[in-house]
């Protein structure tokens, strides 16, 4: 696949939105593939400063999630993208968020989340590295 014309792989920050009390993960539908589920993720921007900030911003934009990044999970490199995963303990869900007309969101248990993310191996691997897998 290569770097898609880039000199270096794209840096993507992924949030793993967690409701610890319920033991659930929030997944959202992909914009490009509406029948596939993903974790909130997107490219790091210089205005984010830290990778954690990008993960938090993406969670808000894509899923209306507000919360606290509590743990760095893992970094997974691929030829075109380097994925950085962070656990985000959800405090609230906005009813009105940026991509609400483009995505669905759903709370699911860990095993169901892994199953839904299998189509994108990096996402499933990131979730399997989280504290929910223990």
Image (cartoon, helix red, strand yellow):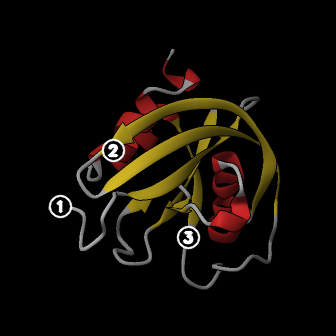
Q: Which numbered tag is attached to residue 104? A: 3
Q: Which numbered tag is attached to residue 2? A: 1
Residue 43 location, x and y as percent?
52, 64
Query: Circle 2 sits in a helix, a strand or a loop, which is it?
Result: helix
Query: Circle 3 sits in a helix, a strand or a loop, which is it?
Result: loop
Query: Would residue 87 be visible to someone looking at this image?
Result: yes
Hey, which quadrant is residue 4 in on the image?
Answer: bottom left
Q: Is residue 97 left or right of residue 106?
A: right
- CA gap, disc 3 to disc 2? 21 Å
Which residue is at the front of the view, 107 or 31?
31
At a point 54% along the width and 52% down the height, the residue shown is: 13
| Extreme-left residue of the structure | 1
Mark closer to the chain start, 3 or 2? 3
Mark in front: 3 vs 2: 2
Q: Which numbered tag is attached to residue 112? A: none
In which quadrant of the rendered image does the N terminus lie?
bottom left
Q: Is residue 58 left or right of residue 43?
A: right
Hey, which quadrant is residue 38 in on the image?
Answer: bottom left
Which residue is at the front of the view, 83 or 132?
83
Classify 10 Å Cα crowding around label 3: few (below 14), some (14-19), many (20 and above): some
Residue 126 location, x and y as percent?
43, 36
């Amino acid at each position: 696949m290569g770097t898609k014309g880039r000199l270096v792989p794209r840096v993507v920050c992924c949030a793993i939105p967690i409701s610890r009390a319920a033991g659930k993960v929030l997944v959202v539908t992909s914009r490009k593939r509406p029948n596939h589920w993903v974790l909130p993720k997107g490219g790091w921007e210089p205005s984010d400063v830290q990778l954690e900030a990008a993960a938090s911003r993406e969670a808000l934009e894509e899923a209306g999630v507000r919360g606290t990044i509590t743990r760095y999970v893992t970094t997974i490199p691929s030829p075109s993208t380097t994925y950085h995963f962070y656990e985000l303990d959800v405090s609230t869900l906005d009813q009105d968020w940026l991509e609400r007309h483009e995505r669905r969101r759903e709370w699911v248990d860990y095993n169901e989340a892994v199953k839904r993310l299998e189509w994108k191996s990096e996402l499933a691997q990131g979730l399997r590295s989280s504290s929910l897998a223990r």
